[in-house]
Image (cartoon, grey):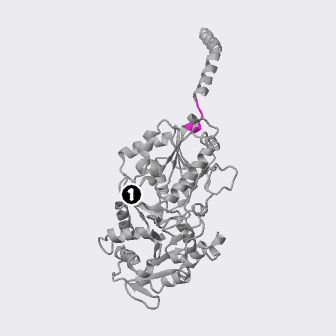
Amino acid sequence: MALWFGNWNTLLFLYFYILSQKGNLCSSEENLQTEKKDVRLRDLVFIVLSQSNTYHKQRAKEFNHHFHKQLKDTSQEDHPELYLLHKKWPSTGSWTIFPILQNIAEKFKEKSWVIFVEEETRIDLSRLVDVLNKYDYKKDYFLGKALYDKSPTIIHHFAFFDDPRKFGYPDPAAGMCFSQGLLTSLAERLATEDIKNDFTIDYKHELAMFIWKDGKGVNLTNVEEFCTISDSSNCVTTSPFIFPKCGSPVSRNDIYVAVKTCEKFHKDRIPIVKATWGKENIDIEYFSETEDSLIPTIDLGIPNTERGHCGKTLAIMKRFVEEEKLSSKQWLLIADDDTIINLKRLRRLLSCYNWKENIALGERYGYALKDGHGYDYITGGGGMVFSRSVVKEIASQCNCPSNESPDDMILGMCLKRMKIPIIHSKYFHQARPEDYSSDYLSDQLPVSFHKHWMVDAYKVYDLLLKGDPADHDEL
C-alpha cells in the first residue's frame, strides 16, 4: 500500500510538472521550427558547363539573359550565384567536374546546393527552389533526371551487365544538383582516394558511379520535375533546343570528306558508305593502303595498321593543305569506313561555327583528366571535323610517334600543346544507337553514329534521317 501510494505521488508530481512546463515545451518546438530555414535562391550556386568557342559563348550569354530575367524583381543580395565553366574553371578536364569538385566544395561550403547545367538548359528558378526544399541539403543528395541503359554498353564499360536498367545516371541537360552534404563527403574522398580510371568516355555515368561507390555511397535521386523535352507542366528544367538553328547550312562545296579504310573492308564497309551517306553530292574520297580503281581509293604510302592509324590521318591532313584542288575547302571531315553520318545535319551544324577560327569539333573524350592534367581529344569513330586553319596548324606542327599510334589521342595532345580547345558536340556519337539511353537521344537530332557491329547500318542511316523534315530537303 505504501509502495502504491508512493508511486501515485510520483505520477501526480510528474503530471503537474509537465503542465507547468507546457508553455516551455511549445516554445521549444516553435524555436526548432524557426531555426529550420527553407532554402532560398541566395543559397544556390549554378555552374553552366560552357565552352570557350565564339558560338558557345553566345549560347552561354543567352542562358545568362534567361537566368537573370527571372531575377529582375529580386534584390541583389537574394540573387543566386552563377558561373560559366569556361571563365571560372578554364583548365583542361574541368568539364568532367572531377578536377574542380574539391575547389567547389571549399568555395561554396556555406551554400546549400550547387547545380550544374548546360548552355541549353532552361530553368524556372522559383519553382526549382520549391523542389529543392523537399530534400535536406545537409544530407548526401545527388538529384537529376535519371537515364538508364537498355543493354550493357561499351561506353559504360559494360557496367551492370546483368541488369543495366537498375542504375540511373544524370542527364546534364536537365540539371545535376549536389547538396552541401554530398559535396563535403566527395571532397573528403577525393583528398584521400586515387581515381584509377584514366579514360573519360561518358563523364556523367562515371561521375554517378564514383558517387555510388560500389553501393556504399549515394544513388542518383530521380526528380520528375527535371526534364529535357517539356512534356509536363511540372517541369522546372528543360532543354528545348533539339538542334541548332544558325541560318543557312554551309555549302556542299565547302566540305571535304576523307574516309579511312583498308583493303580488308573494301567489299563490305565501303558499299554501305556509298549506298547511304556517301551518295550525297559532296566531295568525298577514300584512303587505303592499296589502290582500288572500282571505289576508287587513294594510297598515301602509309601501310595499314590494326589500330591507331595516326600516320594515315596526318597524311590526309597534309594532303588537305597541300593539294591545289582542295584549297577552297573550308572544312575537313575525317570519318571511319564504319561511321554513319548525316551530312545535311552536319552542314547545318557547321553554320554555327566560323571556319576562319580554330575549330576542332566532335565528341569529346579525355585522358588522365581526373587530377586536372591530361588532355581532351575527339573520338574518331563519330567523325572529326576541323576548320582549315586548324588543319594547317596540325600539318605543320604535329607528328606521329608511329603509324599505328592512336590518331585521335595524338591529335588531342597536339591541340592541347597548341592551346586549341576541343569543341564538344552532343550530336556526334562514337557508338551505336543501342549503346545510348533512349531518353538521352530523345532531345537531340544526332549527326553521327559508329560501328556496323551487330546492327543494320542501313537502318541506322534511316534513323539519322528521321525526326527533322529539313533533312529531306535539298540544302
Q: Residue at x 50, y 54 (%)?
A: 50
Q: Position of residue 128 (x, y in %)?
A: 62, 44
Q: Residue at x 55, y 67 (%)?
A: 351
Residue 244 showing in the rendered view:
yes
Magenta: predominant secondary structure element?
loop
The residue pinned by badge 1 equals 197
Residue 453 showing in the rendered view:
no
In the rendered image, the quadrant that contains the C terminus is bottom right
Against 360, residue 61 (above or below) is above
Q: Amino acid type of disc 1?
A: Asn
Q: Residue at x 47, y 75 (%)?
A: 329
In the image, the segment drawn in magenta is 36-42
Q: Is residue 467 magenta?
A: no
Against 68, residue 29 (above or below) is above
Secondary structure beneath label 1: loop
Structural crowding at the residue carrying mark 1, measured as other residues with C-alpha within 10 Å and reported as few (<14), some (14–19) or many (≥20): few
Q: Residue at x 35, y 54 (%)?
A: 373
